[in-house]
């Protein structure tokens, strides 16, 4: 790695750390300034955080299209929390047309990575039988897997 490449890496790391710190401190406009360039370069965590800010108008104006694009890009990279978020977008019809099938697909991907919230959400969906066929056994299995 050349000095230029290592300098770029440490600059990215610093921007990423600063962006996360700003996000956690709820200084969303500063978080957006640091994280959006990293999101545009494809960083999954930056994509996820920017998607949340675009979806909710935090530090920026609401942009549902960008929120969906960023959440989906992070989810497709295997980011479990983004997969869960994308599942909710599809389940609620937020930023994208409602699709129970797509919601379940993304909740399952996150649950397969051990995300308890996705296991619980899937269990509730199978218990209620609203956007998926009611399946009390699958609901019971998922609740148990989630620790209930």
Image: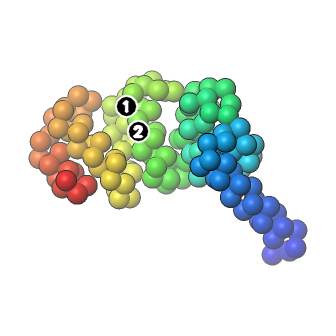
Examine the image and state in which quarter residue 146 appears. bottom left
Q: Which mark is residue 24?
A: none
Residue at 24% of width from left, 36% of height from top?
Answer: 125
> Taking the image as drawn, is residue 74 in sight?
yes
Picture quarter with the N terminus:
bottom right
Q: Residue furthest front?
A: 25
Badge 2 marks a residue whose secondary structure is: helix
Residue at 14% of width from left, 49% of height from top?
Answer: 140
Give the image location of residue 20, x and y in percent.
Answer: 64, 52
Residue at 39% of width from left, 27% of height from top?
Answer: 92
Q: Relative to 118, is 25 on the left or the right?
A: right
Residue at 44% of width from left, 32% of height from top?
Answer: 89
Q: Relative to 130, is 18 on the left or the right?
A: right
> Taking the image as drawn, is residue 47 in sight?
no
Image position of 91 with respect to 15: above or below: above
Q: Residues within 10 Å of mark 1 (few under 14, many from 20)?
A: many
Residue identified by numbered label 2: 87
Q: Check whether the beta carbons of the residues at disc 1 and disc 2 lie within 8 A of each other.
A: yes
Residue identified by numbered label 1: 91
Q: Residues within 10 Å of mark 2 (few under 14, many from 20)?
A: many
Give the image location of residue 123, x and y in percent.
Answer: 23, 44
Image position of 122 with respect to 9: above or below: above
Give the image location of residue 87, x and y in percent.
Answer: 40, 39
Examine the image and state in which quarter residue 64 appears. top right
Give the image location of residue 73, x and y in percent.
Answer: 57, 44
Image position of 32 with respect to 98: above or below: below
Q: Relative to 113, is 54 on the left or the right?
A: right
């Amino acid at each position: 790695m050349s000095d230029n490449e290592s300098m770029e890496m440490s600059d990215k790391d610093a921007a990423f750390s600063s962006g996360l710190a700003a996000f956690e401190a709820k200084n969303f406009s500063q978080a957006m300034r640091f994280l959006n360039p990293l999101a545009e370069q494809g960083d999954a965590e930056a994509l996820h955080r920017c998607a949340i800010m675009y979806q909710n108008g935090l530090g920026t104006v609401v942009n549902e299209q960008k929120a969906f694009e960023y959440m989906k890009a992070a989810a497709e990279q295997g980011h479990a929390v983004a997969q869960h978020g994308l599942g909710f977008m599809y389940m609620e019809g937020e930023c994208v047309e409602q699709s129970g099938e797509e919601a379940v697909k993304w909740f399952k991907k996150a649950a397969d990575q051990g995300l308890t919230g996705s296991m619980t959400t899937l269990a509730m969906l199978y218990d209620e039988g609203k956007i998926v066929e009611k399946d009390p056994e699958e609901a019971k299995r998922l609740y148990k897997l989630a620790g209930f």
